[in-house]
Image: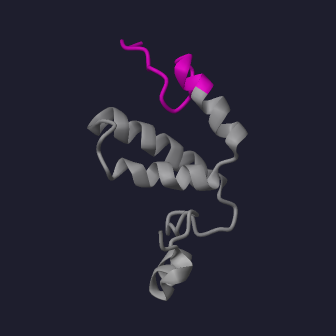
Amino acid sequence: MPTAHDHPLLDIRLQRESPTAGFDARFPNTNQTKNCWQNYVDYFKCVAAKGDGFVPCQQFKKTYTSLCPIKWVETWDEQREEGVFPALAAKPSGHH
């Protein structure tokens, strides 16, 4: 079976496809903590609204998996499963 190295054009294309997140104008600074958080939240909001098969949601996932430390994601996943993740926790209904 041919490999990428057997085809120079394929090799160049593979070098261009980076698993890291691209530039996001909403987060121009080098500290990407907010970008990580926002893309994690946006992914789960997108999936909740559009469903797991909605392709545009995958860009949020690609970005947060690229930017966020694994330990953060594990912690947030646990919080979501327990219903206590701050950005997605169910808000109490009713008025004061």
Left or right of 45: which side holds 20? right
Q: Residue at x 44, y 20 (%)?
A: 91
Left or right of 95: which side holds 71? right
Stretch in magenta: 78-96
Q: Residue furthest front?
A: 1
Relative height, residue 47 to residue 34 (above, below): above
What colour-coding does the image apply?
A: one colour
Q: How many circles with numbers are drawn on the protein?
A: 0
Q: Residue at x 68, y 42 (%)?
A: 70
Q: Residue at x 52, y 48 (%)?
A: 38
- The picture places residue 6, in percent across and down from the top left corner, at 52, 82
Is residue 39 highlighted in magenta? no
Q: Residue at x 46, y 80 (%)?
A: 10
Relative height, residue 9 to residue 93 (above, below): below
- The picture places residue 57, in percent across and down from the top left corner, at 37, 48
Is residue 85 highlighted in magenta? yes
Relative height, residue 86 to residue 67 (above, below): above
